[in-house]
Amino acid sequence: MKAKLIRVLIADDEEVMRLALADFFASDARFALVGTATDADSAAALARDLQPDVALLDVRMPGGGQAAAKAIAICSPTTKVIALSATDDRETVLQMIASGAMGYVVKGTDPNEILEAAARASIGQSTLSPDIAGGVVDAVARELHREIDAARLRAEGLARIERAIDLEGVGIYYQPIWSLRSRSIAGFEALARFSLEPQRTPDLWFVEAGVVGRVVELVSAVARLALAAEIPDQVFLAINLSPETILADRLGSILQGRIGRGVVIEVTEHSPVGDYPALAERLAEWRNGGVRLAVDDAGSGYASLRHILQLKPDIIKLDISLTRDIDKDAGRRALAAGFVAFAEASGATVVSEGIETRAELDTVIDMGVSLGQGYLLGRPARPETAFSEDLGPSWPG
């Protein structure tokens, strides 16, 4: 029985090389040349229409050999791709292999070697020019090890975050927010604490949740746990929600149960806000029911200013970097005074975060800041301590 011909497509923008390759394959009875192309688009189109067994692609033709290889893998998945190059550049070899090529030959290679490379490719055998094979194999091995390590680290991270979503090793602490005028506790901010390994700050847990695509689930789980606590009726409870979580509306039913009971949503910045109108619309549904909105970290960057202007919050929280040493720094006082004036004009309330010294406390009081929060006024505590009249914090003497 007559052997089936190996159907070959050649794509090279150099006419002399293209014609020479065509002659090589025409002289060998094992092959049938089905077409030639001069750029990536025409190579992909011919491969789609002709479904060749083997395609030889010049790596530097117009459109690029990588693009052609990727397109052929989609439109003619049975076609075996061999990359052709004038050099043995290892980086190009790796790029072509990553794009789907199973062979790579240098154009100066003996014509018979190119023919044999095509024959081997047609039956699924990889081909690399001998002078570059060793280095490429080593490089590919290193790349595979990196990919395996990255996949392993991602799997480990996802497993950690899944445990956190299940609230394993997760607790909620409540830090008091004081009225600086009446010297009484006006509310509490709910703060997540993680006892899982590795030991690290809460913000890094939310960063990792974002990396593995589970930040909405983690923020929602933490917020549900925070809202489950029995908060004194006369104070508000502030919970931190990322924009993604707000838009996903994972907490709508729980918030409905808390309407009119002093819930404050603090918009956090685990990721940028891509659609302010949609975010404001979703928040409006909750705010119309009595939930208030706070923008965190005012004064720490442009993003927080955009939040304030776009979302028009009820509460503006001055970042700890603005409060720290405010008694000693005229620039900090000037910026904080600007927020206080803006709040008065817009009907918002200002909270100074991170108050740690009596001088800082006296300064923000003199400036007309309404609410204060920080270690001087009370550290985060478990609910049984935070909400106890006997054990809770008192005004610093």
Image (cartoon, helix red, strand yellow):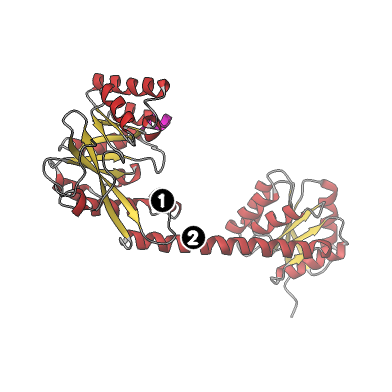
> In this view, which residue lies farthest toward the bottom?
1
Q: Position of residue 234 (x, y in %)?
A: 11, 40
**Depth check, front residue: 385 or 20:** 385
Q: Mark 2: which amino acid? A: Arg
Q: Residues within 10 Å of mark 1 (few under 14, many from 20)?
A: few
> Magenta segment: does it hold 299?
yes
The answer to whether residue 266 is above or below residue 7 is above
Please indicate whether residue 24 sits to the left or right of residue 124 in the image: right
Q: State the image quarter where residue 100 is shown.
A: bottom right
Q: Which residues are magenta?
A: 298-304
Residue at the image point whose x is 67% and y is 62% from the top: 142
- The residue pinned by badge 2 equals 154
- The residue pinned by badge 1 equals 201
Q: Mark 1: which amino acid? A: Thr
Q: CA distance from mark 1 to mark 2?
A: 19 Å
Secondary structure of residue under mark 2: helix
Say which label, 1 or 2, has the lower sequence index.
Answer: 2
Please indicate whether residue 339 sits to the left or right of residue 50 in the image: left
The answer to whether residue 286 is above or below residue 82 is above
Q: Position of residue 15 (x, y in %)?
A: 82, 46
> Magenta segment: does it hold 36?
no
Please indicate whether residue 83 sits to the left or right of residue 309 in the image: right
Please indicate whether residue 287 sits to the left or right of residue 79 in the image: left
Q: Position of residue 322 (x, y in %)?
A: 39, 30
Q: How many marks?
A: 2
Quadrant of the image containing the C terminus: top left
